[in-house]
Amino acid sequence: MTDQTPALELEDLTMHYGPVRAVDGVSFAIRPGQVTALVGESGSGKSTVGRCVVRLVEPTAGTVRIAGTDITHLSRRVLRKHRDDVSIVFQDPAGSLDPRMLVGDVVGEPLRIGARRLPRKERDRRVAEELGRVGLRPAVARRYPHELSGGQRQRVSIARALISSPTLLIADEPTSALDVSVQAAVLNLLADLQRDIGFACLFITHDLSAVEYLADEIAVMYLGQLVEMGSRERIFARPRHPYTQALLAAAPVADPVEQRSRTRVLLGDDLPSALDPPSGCRFRTRCPLAFDRCATEVPPPIPVGDGYAACHLVRPDGTGPDVRVSSGHEVGA
Ligand code: ADP
Ligand code: MG
């Protein structure tokens, strides 16, 4: 592996659950130390991408490479050798932590098995250190997960995920299940840890505003496919795909119900079924700008800045329309 080897590389990743086309040909790479946000509405296939990367499921097709190693179809046994390279933090810390284990054992478990096995004493020292790093007192090690608050539990999940020094962290909606009052603190903690330690991160979220200060790159997913990719700066300043524009037009508000109703102004109905995605451009059934070609031709990715947008209305020079303006929801330049 050289410095140029991506921490994560997905090539045409495809995951079908029987007839459900959850992920349909997703490709992108994350450089070492880079944060890529994967955004899109609930049901667009984001978690499935994360589950393929940590091999909770075996992809239907395509390739997953972690630090240069193709792990797409490795057996459980061989996969274990790579377990330290990648960790995942789930949305719901209550559901992802074993309630019968003391916090210290939960956090220290990755150092009890595998390549990074450490003797008990050394392990306890590392657990205390890791708890400190996520802002928890060492005494928390002797508590059970249910004795902690939601925010504290998610800090425990983060400590556990980072104790093996992974090169890549998957964070799947890590703050969505938390009280709004503690979401920012946990988000800031993750951002600080990422900057200090420098692990690469795939940050999965339905809330584009959550990644404004965290992501280097943004990948926008719609119904199993990427519709736009680019630097955070470019995506926020000049989103090119109508779907990205619609997501951005839903100005961040604390109330999730209110948030959904605002998004609906532009997006209308819910996501179509992944059982039978629309022909041509998958977004066309909800796109205010759709025209006949959108139903017959799959839009190719058109280069925009360092990334692309897959829309028939994006011109070869990377310019294109803005649904926020054309539908009266102008929100800045
Ligand atoms: P997201 O994380 O963006 O909300 P998911 O990856 O969870 O999306 O789901 C993508 C699609 O795959 C949805 O249509 C969902 O219902 C479906 N799906 C997810 N997991 C399974 C599963 N185990 N079996 C069948 N369908 C699934
Ligand atoms: Mg999800």
Image (cartoon, grey):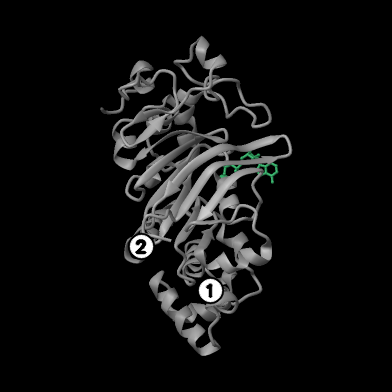
**Mark 1 Cα within 10 Å, few/some/many (few <14, many 20+)?**
many
Helix, strand or loop status at disc 2: loop
The residue where tag 2 is placed is 198
Q: Are marks 2 and 1 in contact (CB under 8 Å)?
A: no
Given residues 20 and 10, the one toward you in this image is: 10
Residue drawn where x is 48% and y is 40% of the image: 256
Residue 296 picture quarter: top right
Give the amino acid at mark 2: Gly
SS for dot 1: helix
The residue that mark 1 highlights is 107
In the rendered image, residue 263, in percent from the top left (x then y), is placed at 46, 30
Of all residues, the one furthest to the left in this rendering is: 333
Taking the image as shown, residue 172 lies to the left or right of residue 277, namely left
Residue 299: where, in percent of width, then height? 48, 22
Q: Is residue 280 above or below residue 184?
A: above
Tell which tag, 2 or 1, sits nearer the viewer. Answer: 2
Kindly identify the residue that appears in the image at 47 percent across and 53 percent down: 8
Query: On the rendered structure, is 67 left or right of 307?
Result: right
- The residue depicted at 52 percent of the width and 77 percent of the height is 116
Spatial separation of the CA atoms under disc 2 and disc 1 = 20 Å
Is the C terminus in the top left, top right, bottom left or bottom right quadrant? top left
**x and y percent of residue 238 in the render?**
30, 30
The amino acid sitting under disc 1 is Val
- The residue furthest right is 18
Q: Position of residue 88 (x, y in %)?
A: 53, 59
Ligand 1, image quadrant it occupies: top right
Whether residue 149 appears in this view of the structure is no
Q: Is mark 2 within 8 Å of ligand 2?
A: no
**Can residue 274 be seen by looking at this rendering?**
yes
Crowding at mark 2 (Cα within 10 Å: few <14, some 14-19, many 20+): some
Q: Earlier in the sequence, mark 2 or mark 1?
A: 1
> Which corner quadrant holds the N terminus?
bottom left
